[in-house]
Structures are given as C-alpha cells and as structure tokens.
Amino acid sequence: MEGGYNSELFITVIAIILIVILLVIFIISFFFIHQNRLENHQLEKAALKAQFEQEILNAENEIQDSTMKHISRELHDNVGQMLTLVKIQLNNLSEESPDNKKINDSKEFVNNVLTDIRALSKSLNSDNLLHEGLEKAVGFEVDRVKKLGNYSVKFSANTGIVSVDRKKEVLIFRIFQELLQNCLKHAKAKNIEVSLEETMQYLNLEVVDDGIGFDFETKIQKNGFQSGAGLNNLIHRAALMNGTLVFERGKVSGTKAQLTIPV
C-alpha cells in the first residue's frame, strides 16, 4: 500500500514538474515571440517613417525644382527678351550717335546684365545644368560667382568613379547652391574653396570660406529671423540620402561645410 502511495506521489511530482517546465517554456516562448513582434513592429514603423520622409523630400525637391525652372523660364523669356529689345534700341541709337559715351556705356551694361541673367537662368534649371553631370554644374556655378569679381573661388574635382542617382544629383547641387549663397550673403568671405570627390563608397563635397564664421550649435538653437532653420533643413536633406552635412571652424578662420553621401 505504501509502495503504491509513493509511486502515485512520485508520478504526481513528476507531472507537476513537467507542467511547471512546460509553463516556463510557454512563458519564455511567449516573451520571445512578443519581443520579436515588437521589434518587427518597430522596424516597420521606422521603415514607414523613412519612406514617408523620403516622399516628403521628393515632394519638396520637386516643388523647389519646379519653382526654380519657372523662375528660370521667366528670366529667360520675359526679362531676357525685354533687355534684348533695350539692346536693339541702344544699337540703333549708337548708329545715330556713334561717339555718345553714355549710349556705348549703356550698351556694355545691358550686355553684361544679359550675360548674367542667362547664366542665372541656366543655374536655376537643373535639367539644363545637370545635363553634363554634377561636376560641370558645380563648375558652372563657381564660374558664375567668379565673374562677380568680388570673390576668389577655387574648384577642384575628382569624379567619374561612380554613377550618382539623378535625384541625388539634383539634391546635392541644391545643397551646394545654398552653401555657396551662405558664403556670399553671411560669411563676408573673400576666398572660397570648393572640392568635389568621388570614391567607390562616398561622394564628398566641401565648401570652405575665410569669412567671419559662426557658432553652429548656437545658430541652430535660435528662433525667428536669425534661426538656423535653413541649416537644419540642409542637414535633414543630407540625412534622408543617408548622408551627413557637418559644419566646422576653418583652419584659420571662416567655416568648412562637408557633405558626405554614400553612393
């Protein structure tokens, strides 16, 4: 009798132990399944967020590019044509009074303005400007600034190693234009150096000036008219291309902006 009781007790204990083990296995399995689902959910959310931000970036880029092209056409078709008519009128007056210095000076002035407007019109139209690639577009913009006569601008390039996506080229060029405009409008620089380099992994664009420089961390925290919203926007655009845009103090003075995009 006692042997049978012990046997039943042993079986009961074994059954309880097995139930506990199965319960522990179930809890652990449930925990890992829950964690896995949670991680997958987080990954899906991150992917959707990245996709949403990419769509926003594409929309912003298309709107900006469309606006730039519209301004380009207006400059070329309307302003350019009006100045061409003025030039024709001045040519007629010059034939009547060939020694009139004011007329001759006005002709030269109108010619210079027409040249500048055509260059500006081209720089606003990415289809025309990027037809020969990013290096040519950056070089064209550098030459346009050189012609202003107020700045010394140097440009060096080492490209042709990889093929950069067309949409990325437009974004990179627009970021470059903004960086160059910052040098001209805010930095009070006299010397600007631009370099464009491609490797098998990255595209690197640097814009260095010898201007007054600025405290980047303080700038991006400001609000209102003096806020760094424009800089934050450029950094955000670089990030959406999986790249980085970093601002540093120049070796002597001024600012160094470095854009790095994986290709």
Image (cartoon, rainbow, N blue to C red):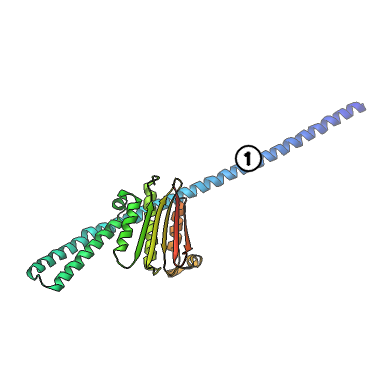
As rendered, which of 207 and 227 lies closer to the eye? Answer: 207
Outermost residue, left direction?
A: 96
Q: Is residue 162 above or below residue 17?
A: below
Q: Position of residue 8 (x, y in %)?
A: 85, 29
Q: Residue at x 79, y 32 (%)?
A: 15
Q: Is residue 118 left or right of residue 87?
A: right
Task: Name the amino acid type tagged 1.
Answer: Ile
Report whether 219 appears left or right of 137.
right
Q: Position of residue 198 (x, y in %)?
A: 42, 49
Residue at horizontal 52%, vertical 48%? 46
Nearer-the-camera pick, 226 or 141? 141
Q: Please say whether residue 175 is visible from this viewpoint.
A: no
Q: Hey, which quadrant is residue 25 in on the image?
A: top right
Residue drawn at x 37%, y 50% is: 169
How many numbered discs sit on the rendered protein? 1
Locate residue 102 relative to residue 44 in the image: left or right. left
Left or right of 259 on screen, residue 143: left
Label 1 sits on a secondary structure element that is helix
- Quadrant of the snapshot with the N terminus: top right
Return the residue at label 1.
33
Q: Nearer the viewer, residue 71 or 95?
A: 95
Decide: is 120 above or below 93: above
Residue 64 placement: quadrant: bottom left
